């Protein structure tokens, strides 16, 4: 079950006086004692910026499911900025009691190499200690104040990444600049009175196909197109699978869940049109998500041999060697 945002809780922010070379923030969580303690239900601070990056804290009154001990509050720091390279951050998390004193301080240094990389304190503090009036943590209105500080890095000159990959992805399915088009037909659908073939169009660029997917480029003869949009028909691949295939050619990637769910279809398509790297990714996903058994070992071995899938073949052979007494 994914984490659930607790609604109608407005966490406020105040920039605290920082020590030298540190930037600090105070986040006020109102009515903390009344917040639900269901696991993975959280409140979120406003987005804040430090060292040229955007960050957010999630505060989980009931703790993280299957990670936090019972009765502990969890807090997670999430890095929101992508496309800027990695950053190593030095930071401190603490509670500020109603008298302005720091309590329960934790320091850490972690690397964040992509957007939504996170670091968490699963057992940050017992909820009972926060609610204990003798601890003087909550103010008279029941507000919890969480303090977060990050050490400022010397500012560097920002050098943008090479934009080529983004440019390539931007050309994917771009009708205005395309000079070829794939018509990908689905299987015939049986109606009461007639059968109709549904199809989807995928616009592309012959030069990109020629360099990145020559077998797809060879489906077109531009010499006979008279300057018009050249079209090729594909009838043995589902449109959604072809979308993944062509998107990969343009520098995109296939989500892991899609690779697992459609591994064999993607292997078949990538094998037919010699998109080798995509085929290897789909094969790896298939091997990872498939349990080899005596019932399916031979089918998988024959499939691996037919599609030249060395990784799958190795997995099957290892299984058979380990279970030779059952064969």
Image (cartoon, rainbow, N blue to C red):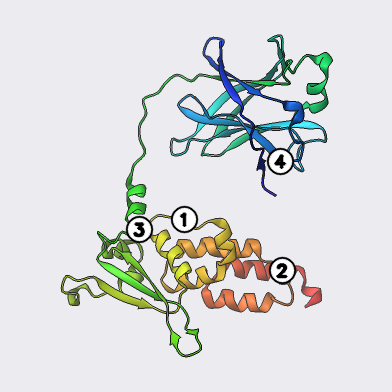
Q: Secondary structure at mark 1?
A: loop
Do callouts 3 and 1 mark residues in contact (Cβ within 8 Å)?
no
Q: Secondary structure at mark 4?
A: loop
**3D distance between C-alphas at marks 4 and 2:** 39 Å
* Residue 7, image x, y percentages: 64, 37
Give neighbour class at mark 3: few <14, some 14-19, many 20+ (Cα, 10 Å): many
**3D distance between C-alphas at marks 1 and 4:** 30 Å
Q: Which residue is mark 2?
A: 319
* Residue 9, image x, y percentages: 64, 31
- Which comes before the other along the chain, label 4 or label 3? 4
Residue visible at 32% across and 76% down in the picture: 232
Residue visible at 56% across and 71% down in the picture: 264
**3D distance between C-alphas at marks 3 and 1:** 12 Å
Q: Which mark is residue 40?
A: 4
Give neighbour class at mark 1: few <14, some 14-19, many 20+ (Cα, 10 Å): some
Residue 122 visible from this viewpoint: no
Q: Secondary structure at mark 2?
A: helix
Residue visible at 56% across and 10% down in the picture: 17
Q: Secondary structure at mark 3?
A: loop
- Which comes before the other along the chain, label 4 or label 2? 4
Quarter in which the C terminus is drawn: bottom right
Q: Which residue is mark 3?
A: 172
Q: Which mark is residue 253?
A: 1
* Residue 287, image x, y percentages: 62, 64
Q: Nearer the viewer, mark 4 or mark 3?
A: 4
* Residue 214, image x, y percentages: 33, 68
7, above or below 256, in the image: above
**3D distance between C-alphas at marks 4 and 3:** 38 Å
Q: Nearer the viewer, mark 3 or mark 1?
A: 3
Q: Nearer the viewer, mark 2 or mark 1?
A: 1
Q: Nearer the viewer, mark 3 or mark 2?
A: 3
């Amino acid at each position: 079950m994914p984490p659930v945002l607790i609604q109608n809780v407005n966490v406020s922010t105040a920039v605290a006086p920082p020590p030298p070379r540190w930037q600090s923030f105070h986040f006020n969580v109102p009515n903390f004692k009344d917040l639900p303690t269901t696991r993975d239900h959280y409140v979120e601070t406003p987005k804040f910026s430090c060292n040229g990056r955007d960050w957010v804290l999630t505060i989980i009154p009931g703790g993280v499911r299957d990670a936090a001990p019972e009765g502990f509050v969890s807090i997670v720091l999430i890095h929101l900025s992508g496309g800027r390279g990695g950053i190593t951050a030095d930071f401190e998390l603490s509670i500020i009691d109603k008298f302005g004193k720091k309590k329960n301080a934790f320091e850490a240094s972690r690397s964040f190499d992509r957007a939504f990389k996170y670091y968490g304190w699963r057992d940050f503090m017992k909820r009972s200690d926060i609610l204990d009036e003798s601890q003087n943590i909550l103010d008279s209105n029941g507000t919890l104040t969480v303090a977060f500080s990050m050490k400022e890095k010397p500012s560097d000159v920002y050098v943008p990444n090479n934009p080529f990959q983004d440019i390539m992805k931007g050309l994917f399915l771009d009708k205005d600049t395309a000079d070829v088009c794939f018509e990908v037909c689905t299987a015939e659908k049986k109606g009461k009175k007639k059968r109709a073939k549904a199809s989807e169009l995928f616009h592309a660029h012959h030069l990109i196909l020629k360099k990145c997917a020559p077998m797809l480029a060879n489906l077109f003869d531009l010499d006979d197109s008279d300057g018009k949009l050249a079209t090729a028909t594909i009838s043995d691949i589902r449109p959604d699978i072809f979308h993944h295939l062509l998107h990969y050619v343009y520098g995109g990637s296939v989500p892991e869940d899609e690779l697992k769910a459609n591994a064999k279809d993607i292997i078949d398509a990538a094998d037919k049109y010699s998109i080798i790297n995509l085929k290897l990714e789909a094969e790896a996903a298939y091997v990872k998500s498939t349990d080899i058994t005596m019932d399916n070992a031979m089918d998988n071995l024959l499939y691996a041999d037919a599609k030249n899938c060395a990784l799958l073949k190795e997995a099957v052979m290892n299984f058979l060697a380990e279970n030779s007494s059952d064969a």
